Image (tube, rainbow, N blue to C red):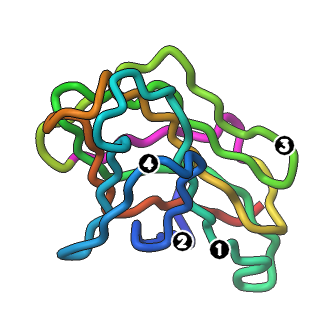
């Protein structure tokens, strides 16, 4: 299946759910860490709001895949990858243990392709083991690929 359109948002636009996590933006990346001194930070979510085309070439669109580019410290894991459209969950992967020492893309296919008309929300749940030097995630971007219905 050919991809008609990819909507990518830079990590500078992330929303971090946990108000105690520290977010720094530098060199085109966003780095998220737990608050210094937090010995047992709770897993929480980082959000990317993905702009969505309503129509392309006169056709409605469907989401066919989603991806996020990131790297983590050795003590950090991405444990969930979720994509929603309105209140409909179109991808929900749990039980993950993703860790990348260099920038890498994690992508998932949308089963069957899901018609979309509004913005799509991509979420990654992050689990830090503490607040040491290896407890961080650096994010570059997230994207959703679309095709005609």
Q: Nearer the viewer, mark 4 or mark 1?
A: 4
Q: Nearer the viewer, residue 123 or 132?
A: 132
Q: Quadrant of the C terminus?
A: bottom right
Q: Main secondary structure of the magenta part?
A: strand
Expressed as whole percent of the image width and height from the top left, the position of residue 30 reads: 32, 63
- Residue density around tag 2, few if under 14, some if 14–19, many if 20 or more, within 10 Å: some
Dot 4 or dot 2: first in sequence order is 2
Give the residue displayed 54% in from the left and 35% down from the top. Answer: 44
Dot 4 or dot 1: first in sequence order is 4
Residue bearing mark 4? 21
Q: Which residues are magenta?
A: 104-113
Residue bearing mark 2? 7
Q: CA distance from mark 3 to mark 2?
A: 19 Å
Q: Nearer the viewer, mark 3 or mark 4?
A: 4
Q: Nearer the viewer, residue 125 or 148?
A: 125
Q: Which residue occupies the extreme top position in the image?
A: 95
Above or below, comparing residue 116 to residue 5 in the picture: above
Q: CA distance from mark 1 to mark 3?
A: 16 Å
Q: Which residue occupies the extreme bottom position in the image?
A: 57
Q: Do the CB atoms of the residues marked 2 and 1 lie less than 8 Å apart?
A: yes
- Residue density around tag 3, few if under 14, some if 14–19, many if 20 or more, within 10 Å: few
Residue bearing mark 3? 88
Q: Do the CB atoms of the residues marked 3 and 4 lie less than 8 Å apart?
A: no
Q: Which mark is residue 61?
A: none
Q: Secondary structure at mark 2?
A: strand
Expressed as whole percent of the image width and height from the top left, the position of residue 58 reads: 80, 84
Q: Is residue 31 magenta?
A: no
Q: Secondary structure at mark 3?
A: strand
Q: CA distance from mark 4 to mark 1?
A: 25 Å
Q: Which mark is residue 51?
A: 1
């Amino acid at each position: 299946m050919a991809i008609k359109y990819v909507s990518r948002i830079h990590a500078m636009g992330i929303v971090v759910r946990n108000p105690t996590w520290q977010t720094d933006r530098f060199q085109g990346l966003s780095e998220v860490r737990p608050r210094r001194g937090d010995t047992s930070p709770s897993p929480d979510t980082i959000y990317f709001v993905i702009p969505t085309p309503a129509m392309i070439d006169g056709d409605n669109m469907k989401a066919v895949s989603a991806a996020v580019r990131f790297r983590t410290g050795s003590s950090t894991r991405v444990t969930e990858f979720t994509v929603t459209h309105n209140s409909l969950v179109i991808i929900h992967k749990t039980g993950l243990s993703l860790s990348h020492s260099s920038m890498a893309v994690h992508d998932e296919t949308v089963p069957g392709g899901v018609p979309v008309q509004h913005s799509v929300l991509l979420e990654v749940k992050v689990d830090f083991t503490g607040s040491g030097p290896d407890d961080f995630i650096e994010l570059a971007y997230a994207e959703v690929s679309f095709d005609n219905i």
